[in-house]
Amino acid sequence: MRCRVNLGNAVTLNGALSVGAHGNLGLSGPINGAGSLVKTGNTTLTLSGTNGYLGGTTLNAGTLNIASAGAIGSGDL
């Protein structure tokens, strides 16, 4: 069984955050810090908050949905 989880809390990245859950995940709270975001797994990650993380974003598998302006941090994609 797959589920959808939506998290609205603020997240601070100090290193790489690997996201590859067994269900779809939505992050609507701000994501900041020097770290990076790595999308793995055959699921969907939706970013909808205003994010300022600096380490870039890597899509290794699945779908990355950028749902609003400013939802993707800086750095390489």
Image (cartoon, rainbow, N blue to C red):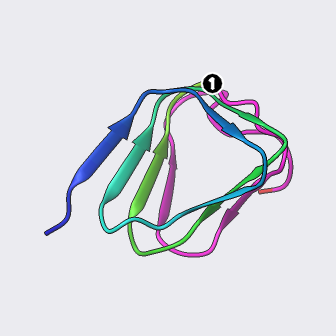
Indicate the amino acid at tag 1.
Thr
Q: Residue furthest front?
A: 14
What residue is shown with label 1?
50
Q: Residue furthest left?
A: 1
- Which quadrant of the figure has residue 12? top right
Image x and y of residue 19, in percent: 53, 61
The residue sitting at 67% across, 28% down in the picture is: 70
State which region is magenta: 51-76
Does 18 sit left or right of 46 as displayed?
A: right
Image x and y of residue 35, in percent: 79, 48
- Quadrant where the N terminus lies? bottom left
Give the SS element for disc 1.
loop
The residue sitting at 77% across, 57% down in the picture is: 77
Figure check: 66 above or below 29: below
Main SS of the magenta segment?
A: loop
- Which quadrant of the figure has residue 44? bottom left
Does 36 sit left or right of 22 as displayed?
A: right
Does 77 sit left or right of 41 as displayed?
A: right
Whether residue 57 appears in magenta in the rendering, the answer is yes
The residue sitting at 39% across, 65% down in the picture is: 21
